[in-house]
Amino acid sequence: MSSLYERHRAVAPDWLALYYRDPIELTHGEGRYVWDADGNRYLDFFGGILTTMTAHALPEVTKAVAEQAGRLIHSSTLYLNRPMVELAERIAALSGVPDARVFFTTSGTEANDTALLLATAYRGSNQILAMRNSYHGRSFSTVGITGNRAWSPTGLSPLQTLYVHGGVRTRGPYAQYTDERFVDACVADLEDLLGHTRDVAALIAEPIQGVGGFTSPPDGLYAAFRRVLERHGILWISDEVQTGWGRTGDHFWGWQAHGQAGPPDMLTFAKGIGNGMAIGGVVARAEIMNCLDANSISTFGGSPITIAAGLANLTHLQDNDLQGNARRVGALLMERLRSAVMGVEFVREVRGRGLMIGLELVRPGTDQPDPDVASAVLEAARERGLLLGKGGGHHTTALRIAPPLSLTAAEAEEGARILEEALRSVQNEGA
Ligand code: PMP
């Protein structure tokens, strides 16, 4: 156990969970790899979610940030800011939200918090619909719309939240339903809730649940929900913190996979665009964005440094068609992983889109969660030089794969081979 781990208690509360029995101290990164303090190299299959959207130490981002730091760091929303306007215009044009306006924040949590502020003010209601098993952040308001109880440390909330079925049906009453029957049941559930509830402000949903384990609702669910929401004048907020910027391969935003559901009234984004810098934001229809009567709601959102990183990163993403790369390499990786898990009896499902792939781990022969096996695979992969993520509801039973979007085919193959070895070693040891 490193002495830094002991000292870590000085900066974090006891409940803060670190990955790995012997937590890793990362010292540097390059491309899709990171190194620890002992000089070990790891292929990073999780950094894409933890912020590194394109690549570690991307030279264009490093240069843009250094140049901006040498010119001006002053973070004030009291003056005009040319790069901020430029990035806002580009995101508005990409967003698909009609008559879009962008407001920058410092995190995804704050972006969702702002979206909630806008929705509640616009609709004059503090009632919010959220999905079961959802994750939307860690502030007081976003904890209150986070259905995933493992990440929701208090039941007290400034909002009245109603949780809707539809996020996940890995197990539980809907597990055996066909897609069609599941959609019908979830819509009936939503109608039922709304039957006794007046003036709900918004539904917030992740197009693919991220922390929840990379589970997608079936095609047609959000489109069916949207028809109901529109009848009641309820806004739809798409939380794109994990699904945005082309990660899902076929689409630039997660909401686009849900066809007639979109475009949303608001979408929120975060860390990925800054490639590690503290940035987030909300895109909203002008009418909604302008409903507040306030001077400003952030000083740091859109600071010159984070904006410089965002502009350089977005340019790199588009010039190198990293969405296309996510589609192509994601398809290879998915195929390779599906063959890698054959015969591994505790893997129940390999799912996802593009470079957002989840593996559901269970007790062999059942659909019951087995958190120990997920931790064992994580450790075994780390020993072999691969970093993965965990997730999946109260019981952490899914492995999450979200590498930087520049992952090459050779790296996908390397990661799949290591993961296969890790899975088989855990199976043989009977963890
Ligand atoms: N929404 C989703 C879907 C997320 O996955 C996260 C972070 N993992 C957040 C919001 C919160 O973002 P942040 O950590 O930047 O506050």
Image (tube, helix red, strand yellow):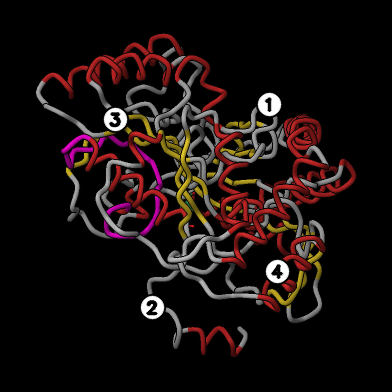
Q: Is residue 151 magenta?
A: no
Query: Tag 1, which secondary structure?
Result: loop
Camera-side residue of 143 and 298: 298
Q: Which is closer to the viewer, label 3 or label 1?
A: 1
Disc 3, disc 1: CB below 8 Å?
no
Q: Position of residue 138 (x, y in %)?
A: 37, 59
Please give the residue where the numbered disc 1 appears in the rendered image.
Answer: 250
How many numbered dots are placed on residues in this image? 4
Please give the residue where the numbered disc 3 appears in the rendered image.
Answer: 164
Query: Tag 3, which secondary structure?
Result: strand
Q: Which residue appears at 43% of the width and 79% of the height? A: 12
Q: Going from the N terminus, do you reach mark 2 or mark 4 first?
A: 2
Q: Which mark is residue 13?
A: 2
Q: Going from the N terminus, do you reach mark 2 or mark 1 first?
A: 2
Q: Which mark is residue 390?
A: none
Q: Which residues are magenta?
A: 123-142
Camera-side residue of 85 and 428: 85
Q: Which is closer to the viewer, label 2 or label 1?
A: 1
Q: Position of residue 259 (x, y in %)?
A: 53, 17
